[in-house]
Image: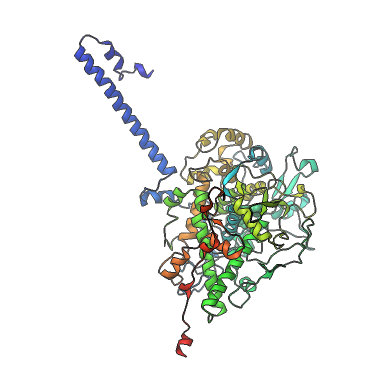
C-alpha cells in the first residue's frame, strides 16, 4: 500500500533509463531522499522516545522544571479537614533544638502536620460506595472479588524461586522504616470478657459491629484452607478518626506513629511512653542483658529458651513500637540493633562530655540515631527501591530541601499499597550464619512470629545479622511467598493453616481505607487512563490482564495493590512506575517536609558543619559494627558481595569508626573554676 503512494517517486525514477545523467542524478537523489526521510523519521522517533523516556524514565541531565514534573500533586480535597476541624492548638517553641517525640511543632505554621495520631493524607479522595465508609463496589454494583480468590488466581501460582542481587537485610530494614512512618491500628471488638468477636465465626456480629464486616470468603476449592473447612478469614477494620473523637467525612484513618522518618519505633511516638523506655541515666534507653552479657531491649515476658516449644510466654521486647516491634525475628533484630546503637552513642558522648545531663545525652544521641536511620533510608535503601536515576531526578538526593509548604504526612496510598508492595520481598526463611559464612540453621519466618526466643541465645543475634547480610534476597515479583500467603501469624501450637494470607489482607485493607482503584492512581502518576483492560498493556503483562478481566467487572475496578504488584519494573527500580511514584512522593514528603531532617541548615536543630561532616560518614556498616560482633561488612550494605571473589568490597570494623570530637563541649563550670 505504501509503495503505491503518490509521494513515492522511486519506482518510476528507476524505470527511466533514457538519460544516463538524469538517471545518475535521480539514482543519486533517490538514496539521498530516502536517507533524508529515513533520518527525519528516525529523528522523530528518537525525539518521541526521549520525550516518553523523560516522562517515564528520566535521566540525570534534566532541568529542574522537568524534575518537578515528576512530582505529583495530591488532588484530594479532604487533606485539610483534620487541621480545620479537629487539630488541637499546640504552642511551639520555634527555637527548640530537638524534634518533639510526637512530631508536633515540626512545622511551625501547622504544628500538627506529621504528628502521631493525626490522619494519613490522601493522594486522591476516598472511594466508598456510600461516599462515607461502606466498601467500594464494582462498576456494575456487585461486590469486589474475594481478595483471597484474587491472590490464588493471579499471584500465588506465579511464585518464582529465584534469588536477587540484593540481600535479605532489605526486608527487616524496610519493615523498620514502614513502622517508622506508618502505624494503622485495628478496631478489634471484644465481648466484654476479653474475647475477640470474629465476624467469620459469628455471622450476627457482622450486622452488629461494622468492625467485623471485613470477612474474606475463601473460595470453596481453596488449596490450603478449604481442606480444613476454613471458609472465611475474619479481619478487622482499622481505627478511624472517629475513634479519636474526630468525625471526618468521608472516613479518614489515623497514623499512630509520627509520619516523619525519625526513629519513632525506637523512642515511641508519645511523650509518656518515651519516658517509660528511658533509663533516665547517662542518656540511655532501658535494656536487658542476655546470659552471655549482650544488650537487648527490655525483656517483657518470662523467657522460654526452648527452641522447639512455643508458648504464650515467649520472649517479647519492650520497644518504641509496642504494636509491631515483636512481629517477627527480623524486625525484632532491628529494634534491638537501634536500641544498642542509641546506647552506644550515649556512651560515646558521655565519655567526651561527662558533664552532660541525662537529658542532653539522650536528646543528642537520639538526634544522631535519627540521622543514621535517615541516611541509610535515603542513601542505601531507597535507590534500590525506586532506582538511582529516578531518585536523583526527583530531587530526593538534594541537601537542605526543607519546604514548610510540604505536608510531611504519609499518604494512605503509600501506607496501604505503595510501600506494602515490598512484602513480596519477604523470604520464606531467615538464616543464622556464623563468622565462617556457614549457615548453622534456618527458620521459617512464619514459624517465629511474635516470639523472639531465638535472638538472645548465645551469638544468635550476630548470626542472624550475618545471615541477613550474606543471604540473597527473594526476587521482587508479583507473588508473595507461599508461606506468608497462607500461614502468617498462625496460632501458637496450632497447625500452620490457622494462619493468614498477607496479600489477602493487603488487598482488603486497601478497600477498608477507601483507596481508589489502580486506574485512577496510575493516571494521577502520569500514565494514560485505561479505557479498557487492554489499555493496561503499557505497564502490565497481557497474561495478567487476561486474569484481571476474569475477576473484575471493568478496568476501573482493579484494586490499587493488585495493579501495582503486576506492573513491570521501571528501569533500575524493583517496583513499577505507579508504585515508584507513590513511594517517591512519600519519601519526598518525609524529607522536604521535615524541618529537622539531618542535613537541613540554618535551623535551631541543625548540626554544626563539623558534626554534619561526621554524620555524613555514618553508614549501616558503622551501625552494625558498633552494635554487634559482625565484622567485614560490605560498603554497599544491601548487596550480596562474594567474600572470596571481592574481599576488598568489604571493610573491617576499624574502617567504620566515627569520631565524636565535633560534639565535645567544654564544661563552662570547669573553666570558671
Ligand atoms: C517478615 C516481614 C514482614 C511481615 C511478616 C509483615 C507483615 C505485615 C502485617 C501483618 C501488616 C499488617 C497488615 C494489616 O492488617 O493491614 C503489615 C503492614 C505493613 N507492612 Fe509489613 N511485613 C513485613 C515486612 C514489611 C516490609 C519489608 C515492608 C516495606 C518495606 C512492609 C511494609 C508494611 C507497611 C507500610 C504496612 C502498613 C503499616 C501500618 O500502617 O500499620 N512490611 N505488614
Ligand atoms: Ca516516625
Does residue 526 appear left or right of residue 193 in this picture? left
Q: In terms of depth relative to the viewer, which is nearer, 374 or 498?
A: 374
Q: In this view, does 418 lie above or below 348?
A: above
Q: In terms of depth relative to the viewer, which is nearer, 228 or 192?
A: 228
* Residue at image point 76% right, 67% down: 302
Q: How many marks?
A: 0
* Residue at image point 31% right, 18% down: 6
Q: How is the image coloured?
A: rainbow
Task: Measuring from the top left, give residue 283's x and y in whole percent.
Answer: 58, 75
Q: In terms of depth relative to the viewer, which is nearer, 553 or 69?
A: 69
Find residue 256 and report its image quarter.
bottom right
Instruction: State whether residue 264 appears in this view.
Output: yes
Find residue 230 and report its image quarter.
top right
Task: Measuring from the top left, give residue 135's x and y in whole percent.
Answer: 63, 48
**Can you name the residue that lies furthest to the bottom here?**
673
* Residue at image point 62% right, 34% down: 547
Instruction: State whether residue 324 appears in this view.
Output: no
Task: Measuring from the top left, give residue 216's x and y in whole percent.
Answer: 70, 46
Task: Measuring from the top left, give residue 168's x and y in whole percent.
Answer: 61, 51
Amino acid at each position: 500500500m505504501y509503495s503505491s503512494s503518490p509521494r513515492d517517486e522511486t519506482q518510476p525514477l528507476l524505470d527511466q533509463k533514457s538519460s544516463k545523467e538524469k538517471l545518475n542524478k535521480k539514482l543519486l537523489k533517490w538514496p539521498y531522499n530516502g536517507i533524508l526521510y529515513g533520518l527525519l523519521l528516525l529523528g522523530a522517533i528518537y525525539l518521541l522516545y526521549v520525550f516518553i523516556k523523560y516522562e517515564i524514565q528520566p535521566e540525570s541531565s534534566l532541568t529542574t522544571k522537568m524534575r518537578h514534573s515528576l512530582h505529583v500533586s495530591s488532588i484530594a480535597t479532604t487533606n485539610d479537614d483534620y487541621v480545620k476541624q479537629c487539630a488541637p492548638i499546640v504552642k511551639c517553641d520555634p527555637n527548640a533544638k530537638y524534634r518533639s517525640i510526637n512530631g508536633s511543632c515540626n512545622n511551625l505554621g501547622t504544628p500538627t502536620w506529621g504528628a502521631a495520631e493525626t490522619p494519613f493524607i490522601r493522594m486522591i479522595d476516598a472511594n466508598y460506595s456510600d461516599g462515607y465508609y461502606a466498601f467500594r463496589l464494582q462498576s456494575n454494583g456487585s461486590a469486589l472479588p474475594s481478595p483471597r480468590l484474587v491472590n490464588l488466581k493471579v499471584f500465588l501460582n506465579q511464585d518464582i524461586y529465584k534469588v536477587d542481587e540484593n540481600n535479605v537485610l532489605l526486608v527487616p530494614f524496610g519493615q523498620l522504616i514502614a513502622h517508622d512512618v506508618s502505624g494503622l491500628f485495628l478496631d478489634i471488638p471484644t465481648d466484654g470478657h476479653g474475647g475477640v468477636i470474629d465476624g467469620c465465626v459469628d455471622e450476627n456480629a457482622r450486622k452488629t459491629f461494622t468492625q467485623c464486616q471485613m470477612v474474606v470468603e475463601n473460595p470453596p476449592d481453596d488449596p490450603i484452607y478449604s481442606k480444613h473447612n476454613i471458609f472465611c478469614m475474619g479481619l478487622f477494620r482499622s481505627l478511624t478518626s472517629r475513634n479519636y473523637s474526630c468525625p471526618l467525612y468521608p472516613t479518614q484513618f489515623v497514623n499512630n506513629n509520627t509520619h516523619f522518618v525519625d526513629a519513632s519505633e525506637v523512642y515511641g511516638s508519645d511523650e509518656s511512653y518515651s519516658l517509660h523506655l528511658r533509663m533516665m541515666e547517662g542518656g540511655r534507653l532501658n535494656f536487658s542483658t542476655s546470659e552471655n552479657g549482650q544488650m537487648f531491649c527490655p525483656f517483657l515476658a518470662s523467657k522460654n529458651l526452648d527452641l522447639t516449644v512455643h508458648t504464650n510466654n515467649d520472649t517479647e521486647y519492650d520497644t518504641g513500637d509496642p504494636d509491631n516491634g515483636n512481629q517477627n525475628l527480623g524486625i525484632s533484630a532491628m529494634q534491638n540493633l537501634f536500641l544498642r546503637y542509641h546506647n552506644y552513642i550515649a556512651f560515646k558522648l558521655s565519655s567526651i562530655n561527662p558533664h552532660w545531663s541525662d537529658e542532653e545525652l539522650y536528646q543528642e544521641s537520639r538526634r544522631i540515631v535519627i540521622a543514621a536511620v535517615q541516611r541509610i533510608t535515603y542513601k542505601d535503601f531507597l535507590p534500590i527501591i525506586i532506582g538511582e536515576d529516578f531518585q536523583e531526578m526527583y530531587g530526593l538526593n538534594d541537601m537542605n530541601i526543607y519546604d514548610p509548604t510540604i505536608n510531611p504526612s504519609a499518604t494512605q496510598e503509600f501506607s496501604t499499597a505503595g510501600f506494602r508492595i515490598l512484602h513480596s520481598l519477604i523470604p520464606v526463611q531467615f538464616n543464622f550464619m556464623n563468622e565462617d559464612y556457614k549457615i548453622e540453621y534456618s527458620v521459617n519466618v512464619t514459624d517465629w512470629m511474635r516470639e523472639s526466643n531465638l535472638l538472645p541465645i548465645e551469638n544468635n543475634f550476630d548470626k542472624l545479622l550475618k545471615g541477613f547480610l550474606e543471604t540473597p534476597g527473594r526476587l521482587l515479583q508479583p507473588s508473595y511467598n507461599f508461606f506468608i500467603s497462607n500461614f502468617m501469624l498462625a496460632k501458637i501450637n496450632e497447625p500452620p493453616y490457622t494462619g493468614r494470607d498477607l496479600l489477602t489482607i493487603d488487598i482488603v485493607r486497601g478497600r477498608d481505607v477507601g483507596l481508589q482503584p489502580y486506574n485512577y492512581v496510575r493516571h494521577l502518576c502520569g500514565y494514560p487512563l485505561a479505557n479498557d483492560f487492554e489499555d493496561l498493556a503499557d505497564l502490565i503483562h497481557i497474561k495478567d490482564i487476561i486474569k484481571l478481566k476474569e475477576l473484575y467487572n471493568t478496568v476501573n475496578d482493579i484494586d490499587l495493590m493488585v495493579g501495582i504488584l503486576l506492573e513491570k519494573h521501571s528501569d533500575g527500580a524493583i517496583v513499577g512506575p505507579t508504585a515508584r511514584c507513590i513511594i517517591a512522593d512519600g519519601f519526598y514528603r518525609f524529607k522536604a517536609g521535615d524541618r529537622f531532617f539531618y542535613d537541613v541548615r540554618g535551623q535551631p536543630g541543625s548540626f554544626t558543619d563539623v558534626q554534619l561532616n561526621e554524620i555524613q560518614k555514618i553508614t549501616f556498616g558503622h551501625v552494625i559494627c558498633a552494635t554487634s560482633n559482625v565484622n567485614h561488612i560490605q560498603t554497599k550494605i544491601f548487596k550480596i558481595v562474594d567474600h572470596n571473589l571481592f574481599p576488598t568490597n568489604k571493610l573491617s570494623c576499624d574502617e567504620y569508626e566515627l569520631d565524636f570530637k565535633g560534639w565535645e563541649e567544654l564544661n563552662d563550670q570547669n573553666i570558671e573554676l
